Amino acid sequence: GAGVSQTPSNKVTEKGKYVELRCDPISGHTALYWYRQSLGQGPEFLIYFQGTGAADDSGLPNDRFFAVRPEGSVSTLKIQRTERGDSAVYLCASSLSGGNTIYFGEGSWLTVV
Amino acid sequence: DAKTTQPPSMDCAEGRAANLPCNHSTISGNEYVYWYRQIHSQGPQYIIHGLKNNETNEMASLIITEDRKSSTLILPHATLRDTAVYYCIVRVPSGNTPLVFGKGTRLSVIA
C-alpha cells in the first residue's frame, strides 16, 4: 500500500510569507508525527498527534509554527512569517496506535529566501 | 536529548559485515532499542528493534548486551546501497512516544 505522502516535495518562499506543508499518513494510522531536519543534523521532533488532537507539541519552536489534523488523517503544518532559519526538511511520520514501527515520508524541503 | 552515543562515521568494504555500535548506558527497563537509517535525500527508514534478546530480520541483526547498556547493529554483507546515516534510538513504544534522534553514524560502504 501507499506510504506516508508529503506535499509539496520542494517549496521556495520569501521571508515573511506563510507556508503550509501537507502530510497524508498511511491509511489506518492514528499516530502522526512532524519532525524538522537541518543539514547535517538528525531529525528534530516538533509535534505528535493521536487522532485529531495534538498529544505533544513540545517541540514546536515558537508560535509561528502550528499544525492541525482536523479529521484524524491528513495533517497540515503551518508556518507564519517565515524566516531564513526555517529552511529545513520537514518530515512527517505515522504509526498504528501503540505500534512499534514509525514510518516516515520523504519530506518537504523548505527554502526561505 | 538523545540517550544514545554513536561514532560519527565509519567505513566498510563492500561485501563485508558492517558492525555499528551504540551506547545507551542510561536505558530504562521498559525502553526498546530501535535502529533507523537515512539514505541521502530520503526519509528515515526503520531497520530493526529489540528489548533484550538478539533480533534478526531480512535487513540486519541486532545484538544487545546482557546489561542492555550497549548494542550493535550488524549488516552482514554491506553493499553500496547501505551507505547512509544510521540512528540508534531508545524508546518506550507504548503511548506512541516520539523517536528522539541523535546525530547517528555516517556509514560509507566502499567498493
Image (cartoon, rainbow, N blue to C red):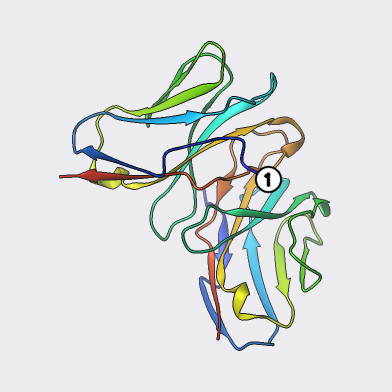
Q: Quadrant of residue A72?
A: bottom right
Q: Above or below — where is A38 with respect to B11?
A: below
Decide which of A100, B77 is in the foreground and name it.
B77
* Left or right: residue B64 compared with residue A56: left
Query: Residue B28 placed where, x, y %?
Result: 69, 23
Kindly give the residue lying farthest to the left in the view shown: B111
Chain letter of mark 1 equals: A
**SS for dot 1:** loop
Q: Residue at x 42, y 29 (%)?
A: B21
> Label 1, on which residue?
A29
* Left or right: residue A32 compared with residue A8: right
- The image quadrant where one finds the C terminus of chain B is top left
Decide which of B55, A71 is in the foreground and name it.
B55
Query: Residue A21 placed where, x, y %?
Result: 64, 71
Q: Quadrant of residue B109?
A: top left
Q: Above or below — where is A109 with respect to B39?
A: below
Q: Residue at x 63, y 59 (%)?
A: A24
Total marks placed: 1
Name the amino acid, label 1. Answer: His
Q: Residue at x 49, y 49 (%)?
A: B44
Decide which of B70, A58 is in the foreground and name it.
B70
Query: Residue B89 placed where, x, y %?
Result: 57, 36
Kindly give the residue lying farthest to the top in the view shown: B66
